């Protein structure tokens, strides 16, 4: 992992920040003090999640050797949600993980982390939840390749209690396969792209 340092007018130098043999890492910054390294995965390949501190030291393995793994960090950088499958990409599971105490629990709703957005206080999730999870699909591969599409209902999920509130539902006359979810600043509207028509929609909360 290498980082550029930018000078007043141009890129000045390249410094080695952290060295690893892991390939194709997805890098994100869940907090100023923490860098997240996500090892890509699919339904037949194991992945995991690692972190290093802001100085490129203290490498931590949080989760490793998980099939169908993708993750979505909360704004506070202390918790995240992740998906997992069996070795054939089936039995999709949706799990909440808190770093303190390494607490994790499987949530009632089954969806992909990419179909969720966190509230600013890092407690609530707003998720597009498929009405049906195909037992014959390889997750998340078939979904990402657009081999299959989902019809989603929208839920607000309390990650502390796993209490769910349904906000809206796909109907026969208008079905939604939501991606790229985000909230308005006041968290009174949920926005998303419907993959079925490529249009932007909003949902009043």
Image (cartoon, rainbow, N blue to C red):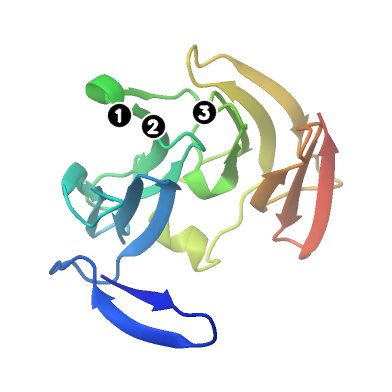
Most foreground residue, 15 or 158: 15
Q: Secondary structure at mark 3?
A: loop
Side (left or right) of 100 relative to 57 = right
| Residue lying at 62% horizontally and 32% vertically, measured from the top left | 120
**Residue assigned mark 1:** 99
**Residue assigned mark 3:** 109
Q: Earlier in the sequence, mark 1 or mark 3?
A: 1
Image quadrant for the N terminus?
bottom left
Check whether the beta carbons of the residues at disc 2 and disc 1 lie within 8 A of each other.
Answer: yes
| Residue lying at 53% horizontally and 80% vertically, measured from the top left | 8
**Residue assigned mark 2:** 78
Quadrant of the image occupied by residue 135 = top left
Q: Earlier in the sequence, mark 2 or mark 1?
A: 2
Please provide percent x and percent y for residue 5: 39, 75
Most foreground residue, 6 or 52: 6
Please provide percent x and percent y for residue 54: 31, 51
Q: Estimate how packed mark 1 is, as few (under 14), some (14 to 19) or many (20 or more) residues with alpha carbons within 10 Å.
A: few
Q: Residue furthest front?
A: 8
Please provide percent x and percent y for residue 37: 30, 56
Quadrant of the image occupied by residue 127 = top right
The answer to whether any part of residue 165 appears in the image is yes
């Amino acid at each position: 992992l290498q980082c550029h340092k930018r000078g007043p007018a141009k890129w000045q130098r390249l410094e080695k920040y952290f060295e690893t043999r892991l390939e194709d890492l997805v890098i994100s910054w869940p907090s100023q003090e923490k860098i997240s390294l996500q090892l890509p995965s699919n339904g037949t390949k194991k992945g995991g999640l690692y972190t290093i501190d802001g100085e490129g030291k203290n490498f931590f393995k949080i989760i490793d050797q998980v099939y169908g793994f993708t993750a979505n960090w909360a704004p506070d950088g202390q918790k995240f949600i992740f998906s997992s499958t069996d070795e054939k990409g089936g039995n999709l599971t949706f799990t909440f993980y808190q770093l303190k105490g390494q607490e994790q629990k499987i949530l009632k709703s089954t969806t992909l982390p990419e179909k969720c957005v966190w509230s600013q206080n890092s407690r609530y999730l707003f998720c597009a939840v498929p009405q049906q999870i195909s037992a014959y699909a390889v997750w998340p591969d078939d979904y990402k390749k657009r081999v299959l599409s989902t019809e989603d209902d929208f839920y607000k999920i309390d990650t502390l209690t796993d209490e769910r509130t349904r906000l809206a539902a796909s109907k026969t006359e208008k079905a939604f396969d939501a991606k790229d979810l985000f909230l308005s600043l006041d968290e009174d509207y949920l926005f998303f792209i419907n993959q079925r028509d490529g249009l932007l929609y909003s949902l009043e909360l």
